[in-house]
Image (cartoon, rainbow, N blue to C red):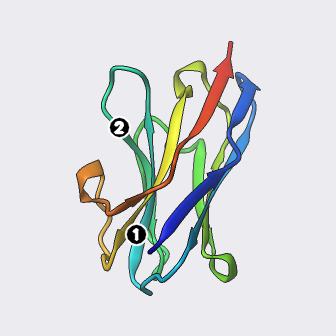
């Protein structure tokens, strides 16, 4: 069974940076997509960014494009989300997700097969 474990959330002032990490453990396939979503109370889970594990393609939501960068660390089966120029509206619980066996990026949460436990990101103004 594959587990996704996130780390790196916290409190930061507006304009600051944070890096989230998501480590996949257990049996994984060589073809999959890793993504990040976020959620605030009373709202649906929102797509943030994703990348294919092979091929290196990435995709970002318009709200984070140019500020967030998704990258992978192959040896550690880990994907990172570097968040720069953070805004108060970026405050949310951030979840990593995996879409096994896929090489196209989905932006809908229901397409993803596995989820991490979530990590809180709070941006103060």
Q: Residue at x 46, y 81 (%)?
A: 28
Q: Position of residue 38 (x, y in %)?
A: 45, 38
Residue positioned most to the top: 125
Number of numbered tags placed on the structure image: 2
Residue at left offset 59%, top offset 53%: 69
Crowding at dot 2, Cα within 10 Å, few <14 / some 14-19 / many 20+, comes out as some
- The residue to which callout 1 is attached is 33
Give the quadrant of residue 48. Answer: top left
Residue 108 spot, x, y in % from top left: 26, 50
Q: Position of residue 71 (x, y in %)?
A: 60, 64
The reply to whether residue 105 is visible in this rendering is: yes
Q: Is residue 75 left or right of residue 106?
A: right
Q: Residue furthest front?
A: 1
The image quarter containing residue 124 is top right
Pointer 2: what residue?
Answer: 45
Circle 1 sits in a helix, a strand or a loop, which is it? strand
Question: Mark 2 falls on what kind of element?
Answer: loop
Give the mark nearest the N terminus, 2 or 1: 1
Q: In 3D space, how far apart are the residues under numbered discs 2 and 1 (Cα atoms)?
A: 17 Å
Whether residue 79 is situated above or below residue 115 in the rendered picture: below
How packed mark 1 is, by other alpha carbons closer than 10 Å (few <14, some 14-19, many 20 or more), is many
């Amino acid at each position: 069974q594959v587990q996704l474990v996130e780390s790196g959330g916290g409190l930061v002032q507006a304009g600051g940076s944070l890096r989230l990490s998501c480590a996949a453990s257990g049996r994984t396939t060589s073809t999959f997509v890793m993504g990040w979503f976020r959620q605030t109370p009373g709202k649906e889970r929102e797509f943030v960014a994703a990348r294919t594990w092979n091929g290196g393609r990435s995709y970002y939501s318009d709200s984070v494009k140019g500020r967030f960068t998704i990258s992978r660390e192959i040896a550690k089966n880990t994907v990172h989300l570097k968040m720069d120029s953070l805004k108060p509206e970026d405050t949310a619980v951030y979840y990593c997700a995996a879409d096994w066996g896929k090489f196209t990026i989905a932006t809908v949460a229901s397409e993803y097969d596995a989820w991490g436990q979530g990590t809180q990101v709070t941006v103060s103004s």
